[in-house]
Every structure is written in C-alpha cells, then in structure tokens.
Image (spheres, rainbow, N blue to C red):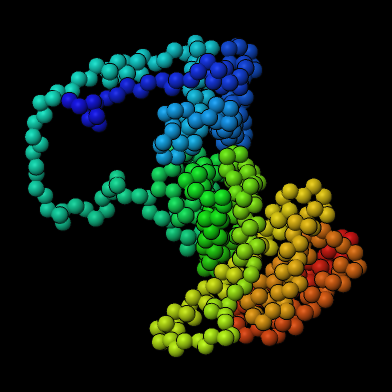
Amino acid sequence: MSSSDPRVHKPRTPKAYTDQQLTFLKSHLPYVDQLNDAHSEFERRTQGSIRGDAKKFALERAADFITTFGLPAEFQGIAEPEPRFREQIYNWYKNTIGRTRRKLEGRPRSSKKVTEKSAQNNITWSTNLATPTIIPYSQGSTPANTLKPSLSTPTPQYGGYQPNMPVASTSGSSANLSVNISLASIRDAFLSPAVDAPSLSSMIQTYAMSKASRTPLTTVIDALFQAISIAQSSQATSKPYPAGDPSYQLLRRFIEVSSYFPQSVTHAHSSGTLAGPRALQMTIRKTSVWMPIGFNPDTPSPQLSMVDEMERISFDRQRRKDYIQWARIHAAAIELGMLGVNGDSNNQLVSGRSFSEVMARDSVWQDDEVEWCAGIFIVRAIIRTGLRGGPAQRQEYEEILSTYEGRWKEIKDETRQALVTEALLAAKEDLSNLDKLT
C-alpha cells in the first residue's frame, strides 16, 4: 500500500530543535527541576486568575523565538506559518510542564495510555481490500433534523442580543479558529460572550497575517462596526441594553483583544498592542468626512427609473445611518481615551483628539443635517471628558451648543431630530456637571 494512503498510521516525530534553541526555550523554565514551591513563569500564569495569561506568555516567547532564530525550515512555504509555529511553541510549554510535573510528583504515564499506544503501533493493514457493497437509499428518507458533520455552526441570531449573559468562556485552539476565518466570523466572535479575548485575538492575528497589506486590520474594524450596528439595532427591538450604548462595551472588548497582539501584528507602522487603536483611529478619521452621492454641480443628474430611484434612496438612507453610527463610535472612542493612547500628559491627549474638536466645531455649519446629528455626539463626548476647563472653555462649549440648538429646529427627519434632542440635552447636563468639577 502506498505510504501516501491516509489510512496508514504515520507516527508523529518529535519536533527537532537545536541545542541553542532548546536553551532559549528552557531559559523560561528556570525552576521546573526543583521540588519546592517555585514554578516556571508559564506554570505560574496557568494558575493565575487572568484567563489566557499563560497562552499569551507562550505566544510572546514564540515571537521572540522567531525574531532570534527565524521560522524553522518545515514551516517555509506553508499556509499561515507563523500562527502555526506559535501554537507549536505554546504546546511545547504545555507538554514540558505537564511531563515535568508528573515526574516530580511521582505520577508515571497511565498504563491505559501506554497500552493504547502499543496497540496503535501494532496495527497492520491488509492490501486485499474487498469491494464495498453499495446500498441504494431513498433521498427522502433522511430526517430533516439530522446533523451533518460537514455543515458549519449556524450563525447566531442577534434579535435579543445580550452580551452580559452568563455564558462560560472557552479558549479555543488557534488551529481550530483558523478554519474559515472571515469578516463575518470575526463579527460574530465580537458579539459572542462564549469567545474570550485571547481566542478572538488569535482569530484576528491569523486573519491579519493572511492579508498582504500595510493596513491589515482595516477589515477587522469593519467587522467591529458591523457588530456594534447589530447590537445597536437589538437594543431598539429587545429589552434595554445593560451597558447603555453598545459602542462602549464592544470598544472595551476591542481594547482587551488588542492587548494580546504580538509585535508581529503591524498596522501603518504601529505594532503590537498599539496596532488595534491605530487602525480604529485611521478608520474614524476616514469615516468622519461626509460625501453626498454623486455630488457634481456641473453634471446634470441622469433620469432614473422608479426601481433605480428606490434603490438610490435606500442606499443613501443606509449611508446616513452608517455615518451617524460611526459618529457614535467616534464619541465612545474619545471617552475611552482611544484617540490619545500614546499621550503621557493632558496636552498630548488634547493634541491626539484635535481632529475631533475640529469636526465638532465645523459640522454644525455644514449643509446636510446628517452632519449636525453626527457632530452633536462628538461635542457631547468632548464635554464629558473635560480635559480643559475654565470660564473661556465653558463659554466656547455654550456657544457651540447654542448653534446646534438652532440647527435642531431645522432638522426634517424625525429620527435624527430625536437623536439630536437626546444628545443636546445630555450635553447641556454634562456641561453643568463639568462646571461643578472645575
């Protein structure tokens, strides 16, 4: 029988590391040969209270390994080489700690596993294979609810999305998560409380490294936007959202996920934990500019059929909804400090969000009411953070709010008028509270 036959058992060979590489790996296991209470750094993290901390440590060591020695030859030319090798290093730490601990505690390998291994190695395959019997069956006899292994897990429905529901988190292997990772699967992972931050981070890393781009996280930000939009829609159709605006909770989740990024994840020259916030900042800046459809005063608008006109209206309506949704995400990012993540002082933080302040001042003077609606969310976030106080600052805020209030009377769309009403009243209340603190 050919050695390529998938039925032939191929014993797994141990991973070959050089003495120098083994010395590097073992340098992070300084106490594994002692019988006292001291443990290796990896083992200590497995017993800590932070979920995924040990895996994060192992993946960081794997990144150091790649920086020092490069990828092994067997990982050259295969799909997703770096994530697979990092997972191999993680398994090495896990298995080494387990074997050493069993030896120290006098727990040899169970006889059952030894017997099963021996029996597995003694299996012989006959080359005289009988012709299989083909049994006809009726296509309609299969039950409708039979679960087929080839079918993927159905996409969860978010009509009653509750991100704070008590579902146990499970940290999956990145090898399993690398299967069919797409924008939709990342979006669903953001929404699912069953996917913890390390697992979601591993998914994003695998997805980003498969993209030959200097800005590989742009699509991930699109998935985050879709997740927030779904949660926002659920809030209007189900019971009140536990944390108020879903933008805040899902952006906090994105911050936590980004904290697990290794230095190999790079977006626009920002790497590691700064790559995620950098990608969000760039997308917010891009989506903060409103562009009307087909705006060209020198070109007469074409005559459209009724169907085409309905499609155009529907498309334009969705663009306006998305623009306001991005403004709410923008506002949440300001309040969470994500637009000044590199700042060490208030001055640097103010500089990092100067674009937001310009947008807040200028939006109210634009022609389209959708920009007024978006701008008031930014104004409220700037007032709530209140990095700069004083009478002059308060007077500027009051003038801006007065201008927005004048625009409120001109808004024709009832939904947008309701949004501006709520944000405007809240901004005035926040301004009065800010005055009490200064």
Q: Is residue 249 visible?
A: no
Left or right: residue 286 versus residue 194 is: right
How many circles with numbers are drawn on the protein? 0
Location of residue 430 with respect to 57 vertically, above or below: below
Location of residue 179 with respect to 315 vertically, above or below: above
For the C terminus, the image quarter is: bottom right
Residue occupying the point 39% across, 16% down: 110
Q: Nearer the viewer, residue 196 or 12?
A: 12
Image position, residue 374 (x, y; %):
66, 71
Residue occupying the point 63% across, 58% down: 282
For the N terminus, the image quarter is: top left
List the single residue furthest toward the front.
298
Q: Is residue 346 visible?
A: yes
Image position, residue 124 (x, y; %):
20, 20
Q: Nearer the viewer, residue 21 or 220?
A: 21
Left or right: residue 156 versus residue 417 is: left
Residue occupying the point 49% across, 24% down: 92
| Figure quadrant of residue 367 | bottom right
Image position, residue 244 (x, y; %):
64, 61
Residue occupying the point 59% across, 74% down: 291
Image position, residue 301 (x, y; %):
50, 87
List the single residue furthest toward the right.
391
